[in-house]
Image (spheres, rainbow, N blue to C red):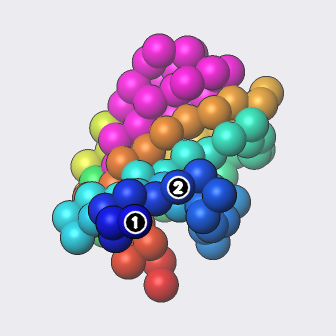
Amino acid sequence: MSNNVLKGENIAPGPLGDLQLAQGESVGLRIWRDYTVDEKAERTRPYEIVGYVVKGEITVVIDGHPAELVEGDSFVIPPNTSHTFSIPIRATVIEATAPPASQELA
């Protein structure tokens, strides 16, 4: 099997409750499956985040601007940009981070 392929049975939980999917040198993919959370503390991350809401709904606040997102919506959080989010009912969100979040949080 190639190092470029990650089979589902080999997916490891990430440090924040996510599942770490394929991770390249420049971009990483992760999924938050059936995830709920009260509003998280406002934060910044040194990487860009691009997300897609697969199911459910989330509220994301990017640089002070709130947005209600539902299935089929997507978002971008630039690096070092203040953001917070809440997920009141179970939602599944796929995120790509550049560089991979797993490298930045290690």
What span is in magenta?
A: 49-75
Crowding at dot 1, Cα within 10 Å, few <14 / some 14-19 / many 20+, comes out as: few
The answer to whether the residues at label 2 and label 1 have Cβ atoms under 8 Å apart is yes
Nearer to me, 85 or 26: 26
The residue located at (68%, 41%) in the rendering is 33
- Disc 1: which residue: 1
The image's mark for residue 33 is: none
Tell me if 100 is positioned left or right of 53 in this view: left
View extreme (bottom): residue: 106
Nearer to me, 85 or 63: 85
Which element is circle 2 on?
A: loop
The residue located at (58%, 41%) in the rendering is 85
**Residue 59 is inside the magenta segment:** yes
* Residue 73 x/y as whole percent: 44, 18
The residue located at (52%, 26%) in the rendering is 53
* Residue 13 x/y as whole percent: 66, 65
Tell which circle, 2 or 1, labels the residue nearer the N-terminal end.
Answer: 1
Quadrant assignment for the N terminus: bottom left
Please name the amino acid that badge 1 sits on.
Met
* Residue 61 x/y as whole percent: 48, 37
Which of label 2 and label 1 is nearer to you? 1
Nearer to me, 99 or 6: 6
Tell me if 84 is positioned left or right of 99 in this view: right
Which element is circle 1 on?
A: loop
Quarter assignment of residue 25: bottom left
**Looking at the image, can residue 27 be seen?**
yes
| For residue 37, above or below residue 17 | above
- Disc 2: which residue: 7
Query: How far apart in space, not on screen, are marks 2 and 1 (Cα)?
Result: 9 Å
